[in-house]
Amino acid sequence: MGWKVIYDIIFKMKIGIYISGLGQSFVNETVEKYSERLMNEMSFNSNGVEYEIKTEKINYTVDRTSTVVSICEKNEQGKLMYKVYDFKYHEILTEKFNSYSLVLKNLWLFLLVVKKTPLIIRRLFIPASYNRPFQTLYLFFIFFIITSSVLITIPAVFDLILTSKISDAILALKNSIYHKDIPYISQTCIKTVSETMSPIIVSAIALLLLLVPNANFLIANLATEFVCANDYMEHGVQRQLLQGNLELLVDYITENEKDCKIHFHTYSFGSIIAIDYIYPFGNKVSKNAEVFCEAIITIGTPFEFVKSYYPQFYQSRSKELGDKLHWLNVYSIADALATNFRNDSKIGDSEFGIEKTSNKPSNINYEVATLNKFGVVEFFMLHSIRVHGMYWDNKIEGQSCLRLVYDEMSKRNLI
């Protein structure tokens, strides 16, 4: 072991940056919960040592904040053991889209589904190493049904208008002008369409509202986050602003945490944000990333999903960090969105990483569901999509994948 490695282990403070998934923005999954789970694992692996967390908020720019959680020994000395900052990117990613109406949001989501449908169908026959193409087809079909159910209210509104007394007056005016009924908008035609379509429309919307609690809220969030994630990956929308803010947070940490090493703790889409920072597109990696970044932990990363449906996203990436970075990847075979960085859907060591780099993730398998549970019922209940949220329980006392993450970090002297 070299002197530099020994110095880093003994003297350099370990700092985490927590980047959550998109869905975490409205299910109350926080950096405090994540840090408490990590603290619990530290306690389980320590003899007679208790820990506590201390929380504060900082401004790393004038209008951007971060919640900072410190894990300390619970004694008079209160020795600091690990510190985690969170990076709140959801507002940055979605701020342009949030001003749109519910109908417009659903229209954008509907158009996105239509646009992606040919590629989704193609992946059924040419998976391109992504092994859940049927689940993706089904998921996009659900998106289609949801958006269609909302958008179909538009003709329902017109139907109500046309069958009202106002429509009678309009038709009477037209008849007085032209002295005859206009065949394609006659009163009889309007009533026939109304009587046929109204029950269908009302039933569809009622079913949607019955099956989906807080439907308006959930649909708005679904449309906003999915469309914004697509725009980020396909068109670079908000990428410069988001990555610039992440760089500002890293810069704040390196200036205020002397002799530190930074670890990214990421879940789901948050891992795509971190990978985008560490392996920037077409640019030299930042000095902060090169000097201070030591590790990335990706949990349930949709790396292969993105690679399959956005094939240009990982191309022409900077490879400067190479093997300097510890990369721990937590995945579940039952999770349709998680990546095992293999050319099959089996448990085992990773076989690839970022294109044309030698740095392959160290795989950590974590399963809470039966691996062979892939029947018809499970397919239609989106079992392999729901497993994506099972890397920890909502309550911090529950077991989580952080038990395995902590063990591996400890072995590598990362914590």
Image (tube, rainbow, N blue to C red):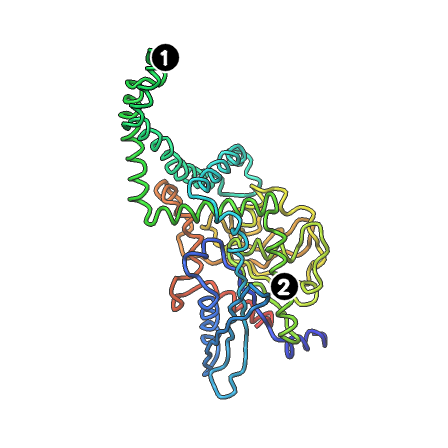
Going 44% across and 41% down the picture, which residue do you hit? Answer: 139
Task: Choose between 358 and 103: the one closer to the eye.
Answer: 103
Left or right: residue 277 compared with residue 388: right
N-terminal of the pair, mark 1 or mark 2, is 1
Residue 61 location in percent, x, y?
Answer: 59, 65
Image point (52%, 87%), residue name: 77
In the rendered structure, find residue 248 and report the number of the disc placed on it. Answer: 2
Residue type at mark 2 is Leu
Q: Amino acid at mark 1?
A: Tyr
Quarter the C terminus occupies: bottom right
Residue for point 44% across, 47% down: 222
Q: Relative to residue 291, is residue 365 depicted above or below?
A: above
Q: Are marks 1 and 2 in contact (CB under 8 Å)?
A: no
Neighbor class of circle 1 (other Cα within 10 Å; few <14, some 14-19, many 20+) is: few
Quarter of the figure that contains the N terminus: bottom right
- The tag on residue 363 is none
Residue 295 in the figure: left or right of residue 147 = right
Please state the horizontal and vertical placement of residue 29, each as a whole percent of the image.
Answer: 44, 61
Q: State how far apart marks 1 and 2 are (Cα).
A: 68 Å
Residue located 47% across and 62% down the image: 401
Give the total of numbered labels.
2
| Residue nearest the observer in this picture, 221 or 378 | 221
Within 10 Å of disc 2 (Cα), the crowding (few <14, some 14-19, many 20+) is some
Which mark is nearer the camera, 1 or 2? Answer: 1
> Regarding mark 1 in the picture, which secondary structure is present there?
helix
> Element at badge 2?
helix
The percent position of residue 14, horizontal first and vertical second, equals: 59, 72
Residue named by callout 1: 178
Q: Which residue is the extreme one toward the top?
A: 179
Q: Nearer the viewer, residue 113 or 347?
A: 113
